[in-house]
């Protein structure tokens, strides 16, 4: 009987220690850590479930969101100026992507045969004169006279 009680205390101590390590590793502090240790010491199954649940939350919190990033204020001002030259934007370029800029972008896009979304895309920037000449048409072209850094010097042709 005493031997079982000893193992029970040891098991609880291990669970408590593991819970504290997990809490410290995930940045949990204060009463949340105390609550986690209570839940962990209640049962082994609950402990395993909560650990896997916490680790999935932790990894999803670190995941970087993908998608289009907002342009800098200088770039927005440059786009507003280009829209103004085309007659789509009538305001003063202020570097803020507001409703008037979206409306001007939609107007410009529909005038030039593009999908009038009001959002920036490669073809719209190209039509504004602010994008790449191959945007949406072909893959990026490396600059002329650029040697590949992946080719060793012994393989490169010698210049004479």
Image (cartoon, rainbow, N blue to C red):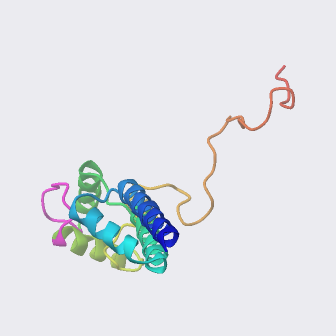
Which residue is pictured at 34% across the width and 78% down the height?
117
The image position of residue 16, as x and y in percent, is 39, 62
Asked whether 115 or 28 is in front, the reply is: 28
Whether residue 73 is situated above or below residue 101 in the rendered picture: above
Which residue is pictured at 18% across the width and 67% down the height?
98
Asked whether 141 or 153 is in front, the reply is: 153
Asked whether 82 or 53 is in front, the reply is: 53
Whether residue 144 is situated above or below residue 52 in the rendered picture: above
Which residue is pictured at 85% across the width and 29% down the height?
157
Residue 27 placement, left or right of 102: right
Residue 152 covered by magenta stretch: no
Furthest residue to the front? 1
Asked whether 96 or 52 is in front, the reply is: 52
Query: What secondary structure predominates along the stretch shown in magenta?
Result: loop
**Quadrant in which the C terminus appears:** top right
The image position of residue 20, as x and y in percent, is 37, 58
Residue 48 placement, left or right of 144: left
Residue 91 covered by magenta stretch: yes
> Magenta residues, as a range?
88-99
Q: Is residue 86 visible?
A: no
Furthest residue to the top? 160
Quarter of the image holding residue 153? top right
């Amino acid at each position: 009987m005493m031997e079982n009680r000893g193992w029970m205390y040891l098991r609880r101590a291990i669970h408590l220690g593991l819970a504290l390590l997990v809490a410290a590793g995930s940045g949990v502090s204060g009463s949340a850590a105390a609550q986690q240790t209570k839940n962990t010491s209640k049962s082994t199954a609950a402990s395993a479930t909560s650990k896997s649940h916490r680790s999935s939350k932790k990894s999803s919190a670190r995941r970087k969101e993908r998608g289009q990033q907002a342009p800098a204020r200088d770039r927005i001002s440059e786009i507003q100026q280009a829209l103004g030259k085309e007659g789509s934007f009538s305001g003063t370029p202020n570097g803020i992507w507001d409703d008037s800029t979206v409306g001007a972008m939609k107007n410009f896009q529909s005038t030039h045969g593009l999908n009038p979304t009001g959002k920036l895309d490669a073809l719209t920037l190209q039509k504004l004169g602010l994008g790449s000449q191959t945007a949406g048409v072909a893959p990026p072209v490396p600059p002329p006279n650029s040697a590949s850094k992946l080719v060793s010097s012994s393989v490169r042709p010698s210049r004479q």
